[in-house]
Image (cartoon, rainbow, N blue to C red):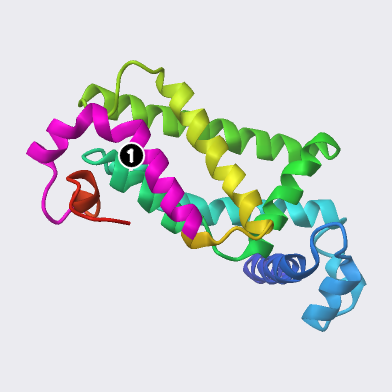
Amino acid sequence: MVPEYRKEAKNRIVNAGLEVMYQKGYCRTTMDDIAKHLNVTKPALYRYFKNKNELILESAKILQGEYRRIQSPQKSNKCPIATWITVFDQMMSSESNEHALLLELIGMTKYEPEIGNYSIERMKIGIEESTKTIAEQQKKGYVTSTTDPRTLAIALLSIFNGMRMMIILGVEHDELRIRWIEIIRALFLESGRDKFSEKCPLDCPGYDICTGFTEF
């Protein structure tokens, strides 16, 4: 088989698997479901994946890859409030099925070592990147230096993932966005108010929030 065609076929299977799992969840999705979605036979799937866990691992990488394509917070150090609001807007989907699948995968880390190892590694990277971003913002005086940056990073990630669960349980996405902004303001705004007013450019997406001109 031509390698390029095999890669394309695997991507089609993974994307089809994600579409089915968004609707049924991981545990309720079978290889038969995915084959039917693609209008192929189940044996055809096993030419590319030996089992469903191998397929879901590839799916998890695609999900993480989508998040990695989001602009890194490290590229927007001038305004931590705008930075973390952007993270919310780009990563916090209003689709509850997406969050349900992600949390289901997290729950599998205890029982499926291959999936668990991958998820744990991605979490470590998320904490490290967020810690680095916050530490850089502290050096510039935009974030209070009285709190360890890793503590703030873990707090933000914990709140963020908690909000995923709230969307599944019916809390409105718009309300969670408002609460997220309030949390970010409480963590970052007061310690850097003077610097924001001096240095934040007028076209910064967080300018009005930082300078207090916008009600949200």
Position in image of residue 126 (x %, y %)? 51, 36
Say which amino acid is labelled 1. Arg
**Which quarter of the picture shows residue 185?**
top left
**Is residue 150 shown above or below 204?**
above
The reply to whether residue 150 is in sight is yes
Answer few, some or many: residues within 10 Å of disc 1's Cα (few below 14, many 20 plus, some between 14 and 19). some
Position in image of residue 25 (x %, y %)? 79, 61
**Which quarter of the picture shows residue 3?**
bottom right
Placement of the N terminus among the 4 image quadrants? bottom right
**Is residue 13 shown above or below 114?**
below
- Part of the protein shown in magenta: 175-204
Q: Is residue 122 magenta?
A: no
Position in image of residue 56 (x %, y %)? 76, 55
Q: Nearer the viewer, residue 121 or 184?
A: 184
Residue at (88, 67) in percent of width and height = 31
Residue at (38, 44) in percent of width and height = 182
Position in image of residue 188 (x %, y %)? 31, 33
Placement of the C terminus among the 4 image quadrants? bottom left
Q: Nearer the viewer, residue 94 or 40?
A: 94
Q: Secondary structure at mark 1?
A: helix
- Could you tell me what secondary structure mostly forms the magenta stretch? helix
Q: Which residue is mark 1?
A: 185
